[in-house]
Amino acid sequence: MTKQELYAQFGPKLLTALPGPKARAAVEADTRYISPSYTRSYPLVAKSGKGVRITDVDGNEFLDFAAGIAVTSTGHCHPEVVAAIQKQAAELIHISGTDFYDEHLTDLAAKLSAIAPMKGPHKVFYGNSGAEAVECALKLARYHTKRQQIIAFYGAFHGRTMGALSLTGSKPQQKRRFAPLVPGVTHIQYPYVYRGCQGTAAEQEEWALNCARYIEDRLFKTTLPPEEVAAIFVEPIQGEGGYVVAPTNFMRELRRICDKHGILLVADEVQSGAGRTGKWWAIEHTGVEPDIVTSAKGIASGMPLGICIAKASIMDWIPGSHASTFGGNPVSIASALATIDVLEREAIANAAKVGAQILARLEGWRKTHPLVGDVRGRGLMIGLELVKDKATREPVTALRNKVEELAFEHGLMILGCGETTIRLCPPLVVKEEEATVALDILEDVLSEVEKELVGAEELVVKA
Ligand SMILES: Cc1ncc(COP(=O)(O)O)c(C=O)c1O
């Protein structure tokens, strides 16, 4: 297939200058009515979606490598997911699992128990969002252990409700003027190797291990009595923090510390779970079993559902301790069951395959693109960290944002994460050809930005 044929079949189709007239009107209405706390990178106004494509209100077609912030795992409006939602909506929309029994709750729980990243038996709590899944894990950890203290990590994002926000350690604006938050949370360094250690591979391993050892060597010997710590909350791959992969030795050390001191290990898999990394859960790549796992985003292809799965012996709270009116809504659960079928049948394997192809191509960019400092990820959770200078690793946040905007203008939807990273998190059903076109666009955009900078002598051109 020639490049032209590839683009004709799999590429974006832009009909208007961006934003088009209807999109401009929608952005104006948004400015008038919608909370200004939202963070929009570019004026994309979606009308419909199919697979990896989004059509905007003016009829422009985009390749979506953001997937609604890593949510539409089976692609936009997968026919099996749509059919399951429609069937369920016609049958029963709401009953409330809090006060009534409902087979949907147990059907999905049985599935989740079969795929959970720790040995069973398990028990499951349903909420409506990632933050609610985290709130559940936080309250459960305190309830079960009768301990108050929590350890979380700098760079972590666990959500924006007050409990989840207290665990979040990603950006100051997320916390500004919201204090006092939930007390008892200690943040420590996450093993963000690219930003923490420039040494040999062995030195990097040692540095990552020391991030975990700090808990016993410093915290437990100075400020934090271990018998008061209920849980360690960790994202096996930090999402909003920059798509940063925690090394296996670090995760194993966390597990050892938890086992020794009776602390619960909570894996927040809201972004990294549901097959995104080429396995059901990102923590499975490390061989470490958590005690509690949180899930949301991709597990129901875009219908609101937050899930907290715990070992049954841990979820021991009594009636009235925790609940949610809408949590485990039958329509969301129908969507999750259909999603799990598609993920199991094809999409997880596809994420592993296409993800490896994307990573292999991006690896080459370290040499050919002066802006590319680091490339990392698993499956289709891929980060591309941009820097001004490969030696100093100076962040280029404004340029990263510009790359996002230019990509949009070329028909590719991507999002940033962390201070200076671009994330690629397309639907897990993305085709190789779609990935090729998306990377071609991204590479053109990077080259364009680099060319301008070299002209302005702002970039240190040492690939
Ligand atoms: C790891 C992680 N946990 C929790 C959340 C919060 O999820 P929600 O926005 O659905 O509340 C997010 C959202 O980005 C996340 O990435």
Image (cartoon, helix red, strand yellow):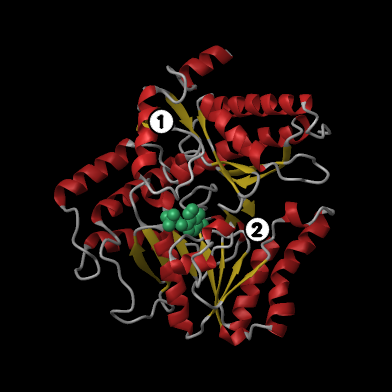
Query: Circle 2: is it few (<14), some (14-19), or many (20+) Cα within 10 Å?
Result: many
Query: Circle 1: is it few (<14), some (14-19), or many (20+) Cα within 10 Å?
Result: many
> Residue 338: which disc?
none
Marks 2 and 1 sit apart, C-alpha to C-alpha, by 32 Å
Q: Which residue is mark 1?
A: 54
- Residue 443 x %, y %: 65, 27
- Residue 175 x %, y %: 53, 62
> Which secondary structure lies at badge 2?
loop
Query: Depth check: 395 or 457 in front?
Result: 457
For the N terminus, the image quarter is top right
* Residue 399 can be seen in this image: yes
Identify the mark nearer the N-term, 2 or 1: 1
Q: Is residue 331 above or below residue 117?
A: above
Image quadrant assignment for residue 50: top left
Residue located at (38% from left, 37% from top): 76
Image quadrant assignment for residue 100: bottom left
Q: Which residue is mark 2?
A: 246
Residue located at (51% from left, 38% from top): 41
